Image (cartoon, rainbow, N blue to C red):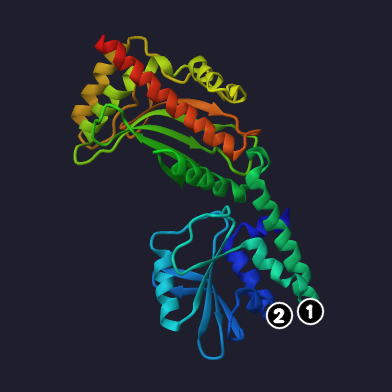
Amino acid sequence: MFLQRLLRSEVNVGAFIGYLVERDATPLQNALGLDENIVSVRVEVPHGKGRMDVVLYGAASPIAILELKVSATEHGDQLDRYAEFAHTHDARKFLVDLETDGSTVPQGWTHIGLADLFDCWSASTNSTARGLAIEASTVFATWKSQLNGRFGQMDSAIVTVALRAVSHELAARTPYDMYTRSTSGGQPSITAYLPHPSGTDDAYFCIDIRCNDKSNPHLPWIARLGVHVDCGDDLAAARRTAHLLAMPLAPVLSVPKIQSACTNSGIGTLATILTSKKPLRKPRSQDSSIEKWLAAVDSSGDGKIPAHPIFFHDWGRRLAAQYSLDLTDVTRNELGELIEILMNHLIESTCSTNSLDES
């Protein structure tokens, strides 16, 4: 448990690698295929706006940089900036992480798994380096294997990696725009967007799934289904558009309707993991409440507005029903299937509503 806690931090992992290199540099030199001997190592090396995790030096200059990723992914143009440093010194570039096999690797970078990197010391002649590296490699290999298991059995370090895998897999087989981010509270989330079938500019169906606490795998997640409208230059107009597109969805966002969609898809096992006592608000006077909200939208301009009377909202331009999602016994493949089921439910419900309106 304590070694896992240590290895969740990229700074700690970098220091660990530096320690092993000082004990015995030869295994890493051979594993990376470096032509020059590693003479020294530095960690957290300042460069531009960031710090490079590990830099390996030969007799006169850097010969390789290791960029480490445990849960996080690239920040901005981080890898491009580090690539400039490597190019200046003719050093090789290695991206070391826990990502799934086949994940995208920037051009010019060589990918290596964290477990494989530490495993190179398993035959070290230095007993200290060998023993410590084997323990670390085992932790990383265990985390990597959890990508194929259930969310309730995942270490907090691998949850975000699993969500990125879901994003990549869905983006490869669907027209969705997929994003994996951290919430304002630092918890992992996954969001799927699909252009709204109305053809309205900058309007999308949106499915947003957020972890409540990645350190507590049995705590239910939050799932929101609805519409999202990019604000452009007129936030008030975006809020009004979101309202107009969301209202027809209200009747199909009840828990029984969602569970029925899962059952009808042939994956009935997913029907009961999404629950809610109150997915939508029910004001006493819906019409007057909506009128007041729309008036507030018009008067506030780009400012804050009250909560939508029916939908949960993010800044007024993402309106959605909210559910509790139990992912304890769900795999990443099943989560991807669930997102597809929910998106298809939104599409089919909207198309059915439009057909009735036309008739």
Q: Position of residue 182 (x, y in %)?
A: 47, 46
The foreground one among 55 and 174 is 174
The foreground one among 172 and 114 is 172
User: How would you rate the neighbour count of disc 1 (Cα within 10 Å): few for under 14, some for 14-19, many for 20 or more?
Assistant: few
- Marked residue nearer the N-terminal end (2 or 1): 2
The correct choice, above or below, for 93 with respect to 302 in the image is: below
Determine whether, in the image, residue 176 is placed left or right of residue 354: right
The residue tagged 2 is 24
The foreground one among 13 and 141 is 141
Determine whether, in the image, residue 141 is placed left or right of residue 201: right
Q: Which type of secondary structure does the marked residue at label 1 adopt? A: loop
Q: Which type of secondary structure does the marked residue at label 2 adopt? A: loop
Question: Who's the residue at 60% across and 74% down the image?
Answer: 32
User: How would you rate the neighbour count of disc 2 (Cα within 10 Å): few for under 14, some for 14-19, many for 20 or more?
Assistant: many
Give the number of the disc on residue 125: 1
Q: Image quadrant of residue 353?
A: top left
The correct choice, above or below, for 226 with respect to 95 in the image is: above
Q: Position of residue 50 (x, y in %)?
A: 43, 68
Residue type (three-letter) at the residue carrying disc 2: Asp
Question: Who's the residue at 71% across and 80% down the image?
Answer: 24
Residues at badges 2 and 1 in contact (C-beta under 8 Å)? Answer: yes
Q: Position of residue 318 (x, y in %)?
A: 34, 32
Q: Can you say which quadrant of the picture contains the C terminus?
A: top left
The correct choice, above or below, for 222 with respect to 105 in the image is: above
Q: Position of residue 93 (x, y in %)?
A: 50, 72
Question: Who's the residue at 71% across and 66% down the image?
Answer: 119
Res 183 seen here: no
Q: Image quadrant of residue 345?
A: top left
Q: Image quadrant of residue 154?
A: top right
Structural distance between the alpha carbons of marks 2 and 1: 8 Å
The foreground one among 352 and 138 is 352
